[in-house]
Amino acid sequence: MGARRLDGVGLAALAAAVDDPVRVARWRAKTVRVPGSGCRWWTGAVSGRGHGRFWIGGHVVIAHRFAWALTHGVQSLADIELLGHRCDNPLCQRIGPGHVVASSYVANRREWAARKELTGSPLGDPRGSRRRARELRDLARLDPHLVAADQERLRAIFGEQLPLW
């Protein structure tokens, strides 16, 4: 049986990338901390849905899958259907409760539907996920404090989103 494919990258290629200090340093260089946010923000390429994209040997892997592999090992991805952003930030690279967690397609869609209509939810942003992600990514590239200011501006307008669970 061949290596399971993940985002165009086989497990063996992903394992080699996770073990390569140069690639890990390149991934880390594309993340920043934003004041007031628990997320680790992606500043590299962005997919059509607003998720980070990371190139590995001529193939693209979703950046938070690379982060997961760094944290939990590549083999842990073999049995995970989907990684969900509990923080509703597709640029988030922080693995753990309240941020990127193992999930399923059904659970992820159910949570998305429940939170999309909440006042101030980033899921209901009229810019759409890709445009929002690109604009916030661009601010994070310039200065992470600009993202913090944008998030504070939105909280002042819409209020704080309360957790559902």
Image: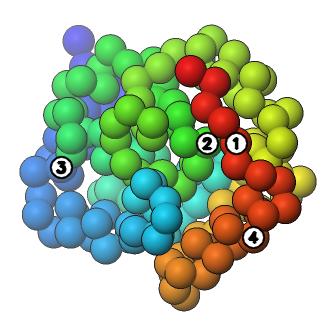
Q: Which secondary structure, mark 2? A: loop
Real-space CA distance between mark 3 and mark 1, rounded to the nearest whole angstrom: 35 Å
Q: Nearer the viewer, mark 3 or mark 4?
A: 4
Contact between labelled residues 2 and 1, with CB atoms less than 8 Å apart = yes
Image location (x, y in percent) of residue 56: 32, 56
Amino acid type indicated by mark 2: Asp
Q: Earlier in the sequence, mark 3 or mark 4?
A: 3
Q: Earlier in the sequence, mark 3 or mark 1?
A: 3
Amino acid type indicated by mark 4: Arg
Name which residue lies at 67% across and 68% down. 152
Q: Quadrant of residue 134?
A: bottom right
Give the numbered dot on residue 16.
none
Image location (x, y in percent) of residue 54: 41, 58
Q: Is residue 127 above or below residue 146?
A: above
Give the numbered dot on residue 153.
4
Q: Earlier in the sequence, mark 3 or mark 2?
A: 3
Of residue 1 and residue 37, the one placed in the foreground of this image is: 37
Q: Quadrant of residue 123?
A: top right
Real-space CA distance between mark 3 and mark 2, rounded to the nearest whole angstrom: 25 Å
Q: Which secondary structure, mark 1? A: loop
Amino acid type indicated by mark 1: Gln
Real-space CA distance between mark 2 and mark 4, rounded to the nearest whole angstrom: 17 Å
Give the numbered dot on residue 18.
3
Q: Which residue is mark 1?
A: 161
Q: Nearer the viewer, mark 2 or mark 4?
A: 4
Name which residue lies at 60% across and 81% down. 146
Determine whether, in the image, residue 108 is placed left or right of residue 113: left
Image location (x, y in percent) of residue 52: 51, 55
Of residue 38 and residue 2, the one placed in the foreground of this image is: 38
Contact between labelled residues 4 and 3, with CB atoms less than 8 Å apart = no
Name which residue lies at 46% across and 71% down. 35
Q: Nearer the viewer, mark 3 or mark 1?
A: 1
